[in-house]
Image (spheres, helix red, strand yellow):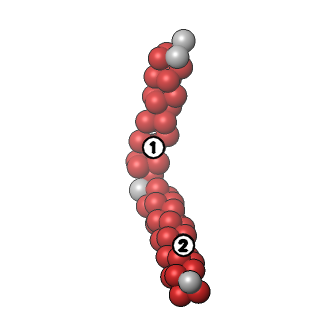
Amino acid sequence: MILLRCLACLFIFIGVLVGTSAVVLVSVLLLRFPLLLIALVLSCWVFTRALRHHFK
């Protein structure tokens, strides 16, 4: 039982580590290529407008 709990904690730790490194990598890419940042902001704006129109 202790081994199973240890393995579960290890997988959770690895998952958190991979998630945070992915966020850091995406942030670096967005700062390195400003067109990606503009495309992301524009797509979020279009998505929110579409949601407002859909639920109106």
Q: Nearer the viewer, mark 1 or mark 2?
A: 2
The quarter of the picture where the N terminus appears is bottom right
- The residue at the point 43 percent across, 36 percent down is 43
> In the rendered structure, which amino acid carries the disc numbered 1?
Leu
Disc on the earlier residue, 1 or 2: 2
In the image, residue 46 above or below residue 55: below
Image-based side of 44 in relation to 35, left or right:
right
Residue 35 x %, y %: 40, 48
Residue at disc 1, secondary structure: helix
- The residue at the point 57 percent across, 80 percent down is 5
In the image, residue 11 above or below residue 49: below
- The residue at the point 47 percent across, 48 percent down is 37
Separation of disc 1 and disc 2 at Cα?
29 Å
- Residue indicated by mark 1: 40
Residue 49 x %, y %: 50, 23
Residue 15 x %, y %: 50, 70
Q: Are marks 1 and 2 in contact (CB under 8 Å)?
A: no
Q: How many marks?
A: 2
Outermost residue on the bottom side: it is 3
Q: Residues within 10 Å of mark 1 (few under 14, many from 20)?
A: few
> In the rendered structure, which amino acid carries the disc numbered 2?
Ile
* Nearer-the-camera pick, 48 or 29: 48
The quarter of the picture where the C terminus appears is top right
- The residue at the point 51 percent across, 62 percent down is 23
Residue 16 x %, y %: 55, 70
- Residue indicated by mark 2: 12
